[in-house]
């Protein structure tokens, strides 16, 4: 499945006023990529008060490239696969995806989802550059390379997580 250009929007952590505007502008879903301690549940309350669907992927903030190796690959891939599934099931929704600043965590998730949907690495990178140049420019090669590394190892982990969900 190829994404439509307007299906994914990348941004920073929203405030109530921006969520109000998003709802009026046709955004249907907010995807929060934050830890609970960063205010994830507050965003849930605000998004739902505006009639927006809310999805939460808890993902530690990355302050330095050395922290990229500490990412739980299985959890990250499961989250990316979950978001991919949401997108595939609801083709006419528009997703606002954010972390704190909309850079590393957000860019990594969008980059992974684009590839899981069948886009090449180059297409996924070009999509991020098109959607939000700041994210692409500031996330840097280490974040992109780490996603590529995780995706190269993903088939067994994703199958495991899919089977785990069915058994639960």
Image (cartoon, rainbow, N blue to C red):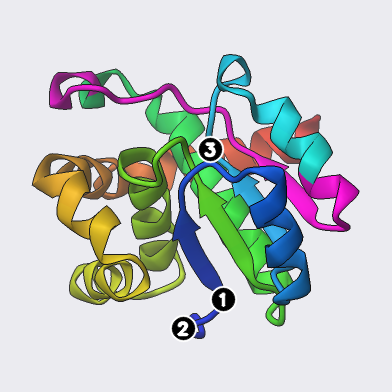
Residue appearing at x 13%, y 47% in the figure: 140
Measured as percent of width and height from the top left, residue 73 is found at 38, 30
Measured as percent of width and height from the top left, residue 133 is found at 25, 65
Name which of mark 3 and mark 2 comes first in the sequence.
2
Residue appearing at x 59%, y 54% in the figure: 83
Residues tagged 2 and 1 counted as in contact (Cβ below 8 A): yes
How far, Cα to Cα, is label 1 from label 3? 17 Å
Q: Is residue 152 left or right of residue 165?
A: left
Q: Is residue 139 left or right of residue 14?
A: left
Residue appearing at x 62%, y 64% in the figure: 95
Q: Secondary structure at mark 2?
A: loop
Residue beneath disc 3: 33
Q: Is residue 99 above or below residue 86?
A: above
Residue beneath disc 2: 5
Q: Which mark is residue 7?
A: 1
Measured as percent of width and height from the top left, residue 128 is found at 31, 66
Residue positioned most to the left: 141
Q: Residues within 10 Å of mark 1 (few under 14, many from 20)?
A: some
Tell me, yes or no, if residue 159 can be seen here.
no
How far, Cα to Cα, is label 3 from label 2? 21 Å
Indicate whether residue 158 is drawn in magenta: no
How far, Cα to Cα, is label 2 from label 1? 6 Å
Placement of the C terminus among the 4 image quadrants: top right
Measured as percent of width and height from the top left, residue 29 is found at 71, 60
Q: Residues within 10 Å of mark 2 (few under 14, many from 20)?
A: few
Q: Is residue 156 above or below residue 51?
A: above
Picture quadrant of residue 125 = bottom left
Q: Secondary structure at mark 3?
A: loop
Residue appearing at x 70%, y 36% in the figure: 43
Indicate whether residue 53 is drawn in magenta: yes
Range covered by the magenta-colored residues:
47-67
Q: Residues within 10 Å of mark 3 (few under 14, many from 20)?
A: many
């Amino acid at each position: 499945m190829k994404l439509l250009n307007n299906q994914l929007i990348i941004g920073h952590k929203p405030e109530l006023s921006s969520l109000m505007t998003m709802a009026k502008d046709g955004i249907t879903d907010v995807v929060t990529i934050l830890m609970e301690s960063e205010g994830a549940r507050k965003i849930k309350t605000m998004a739902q008060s505006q009639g927006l669907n809310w999805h939460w992927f808890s993902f530690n903030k990355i302050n330095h490239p050395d922290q990229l190796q500490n990412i739980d690959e299985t959890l990250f891939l499961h989250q990316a696969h979950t978001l991919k599934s949401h997108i595939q099931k609801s083709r006419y929704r528009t997703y606002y995806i954010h972390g704190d600043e909309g850079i590393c965590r957000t860019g990594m998730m969008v980059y992974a989802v684009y590839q899981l949907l069948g886009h090449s690495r180059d297409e996924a990178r070009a999509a991020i550059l098109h959607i939000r140049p700041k994210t692409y420019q500031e996330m840097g090669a280490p974040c992109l390379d780490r996603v590529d590394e995780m995706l190269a190892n993903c088939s067994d982990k994703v199958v495991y997580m899919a089977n785990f969900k069915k058994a639960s």
